[in-house]
Amino acid sequence: MKKQHLYKVNIEHLKNADGSVPEDSSLAFEFSSHDELFTIIEKLKARTDIGPAKAAPLALGIKLFGGLLLANKNDDLFVSLFPHFSAFMKKIKQKTH
């Protein structure tokens, strides 16, 4: 089996849309990736079309969704998305802003 990096994501619900504070709403989970996420984030931060504010959410979203999509690419729910995701990944990897 290929060596994987292991990550832990913590999400805290800080404020509701109406401004109220939720009571103890949090979620934590682990995921693995063959890529080193912090390297990807740094590369995305340097791009003028993404920048520092969007880099971490984009990298995390891509890694989480991409991993799930690849693991289930033949599943009816995901099969139609796979070509679009693949095209998106090729586009994002070839740009060097």
Image: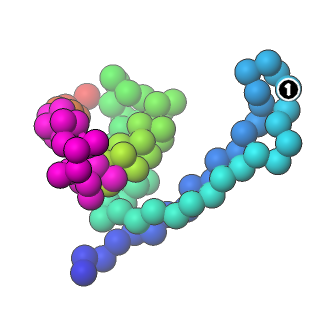
Q: Which residue is mark 1?
A: 20
Q: Where's residue 61, x and y in %? A: 42, 42
Q: Where's residue 43, x and y in %? A: 34, 43
Q: For residue 36, say whether it is visible.
A: yes
Q: Secondary structure at mark 1?
A: loop
Residue 18, above or below 10: above
Task: Specify the quadrant of the image occupied by residue 36.
Answer: bottom left
Asked whether, in this view, residue 23 is left or right of residue 82, the answer is: right
Q: How is the image coloured?
A: rainbow
Most extreme residue toward the top is: 18
- The amino acid marked with disc number 1 is Ser
Residue 93, above or below 75: above
Q: Quadrant of the N terminus?
A: bottom left
Pick the residue in front: 78 or 42: 78
- The answer to whether residue 90 is magenta is no
Query: Label 1 neighbourhood size at 10 Å, few (<14), some (14-19), many (20+)?
Result: few
Pick the residue in front: 18 or 97: 18
**Residue at left 64%, top 47%?**
11
Pick the residue in front: 6 or 13: 13
Q: For residue 42, say whether it is visible.
A: no
Q: Quadrant of the C terminus?
A: top left
Task: Specify the quadrant of the image occupied by residue 35.
Answer: bottom left
Instruction: State the extent of the magenta-drawn residues as a range.
Output: 68-87
Q: Where's residue 5, x and y in %? A: 39, 69
**Residue at left 76%, top 27%?**
16
**Residue at left 43%, top 54%?**
38
Asked whether, in this view, residue 78 is left or right of residue 55, the answer is: left
Task: Specify the quadrant of the image occupied by residue 20.
Answer: top right
Q: Where's residue 68, x and y in %? A: 33, 53
Most extreme residue toward the front is: 76
